[in-house]
Image (spheres, helix red, strand yellow):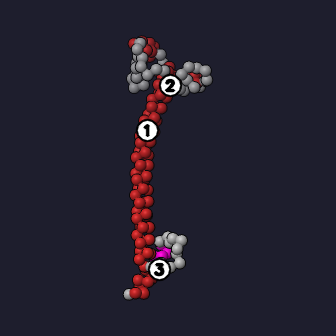
Amino acid sequence: RRAKLRLYLEQLKQLVPLGPDSTRHTTLSLLKRAKMHIKKLEEQDRRALSIKEQLQREHRFLKRRLEQLSVQSLERVRTDSTGSAVSTDDSEQEVDVEGMEFGPAELDSVGSSSDVDDHYSLQSGGCSDCRRPGRPGLS
């Protein structure tokens, strides 16, 4: 039983940092140092856990902020590609014509269906000339 205790104390000496007077340690001084070392490690663990929680909160905040900025960026791109987001002039009111079917008489008054496709192509930024530098609102 004493041999086991000696073995454990030797193992404890290897784990606990010993001070400058490490020539001879009593069992009591070794146990006191081990106790102080354990308290120090527990405090470091508490601090690390606190920092980890703080970083997790910051990470969640930054993810939400990134999502908000991404949505704003997409809205800005949509606004830039279609002109202005809100039109006050009734004559400029947009109508969804992609899902509509036109008869032969209606096509004459509206134009061909390829004209409608070109209109949407221009609105979505499909025109390479429309994106040249120097045009206001486009880049």
Q: Residue furthest front?
A: 21
Above or below for 54 versus 18: above
Quadrant where the image shows the N terminus: bottom left
Residue 98 in the image, given as x and y percentages of width and height: 42, 25
**Which quadrant does the C terminus fall into?**
top right
The residue labelled by disc 1 is 65
Nearer-the-camera pick, 139 or 122: 139
What residue type is disc 1 on?
Arg
Start and end of the magenta stretch?
10-15
Q: Is residue 16 above or below residue 112?
A: below
Placement of 79 over or under 39, stated as above or below: above
First-in-chain label (3 vs 1): 3
Residue 102 appears in the rendering: no
Pinpoint residue 16: horizontal percent, then vertical percent.
47, 71
Q: Which residue is painted at 53% across and 26% down in the image?
A: 125
Q: Residues within 10 Å of mark 2 (few under 14, many from 20)?
A: some
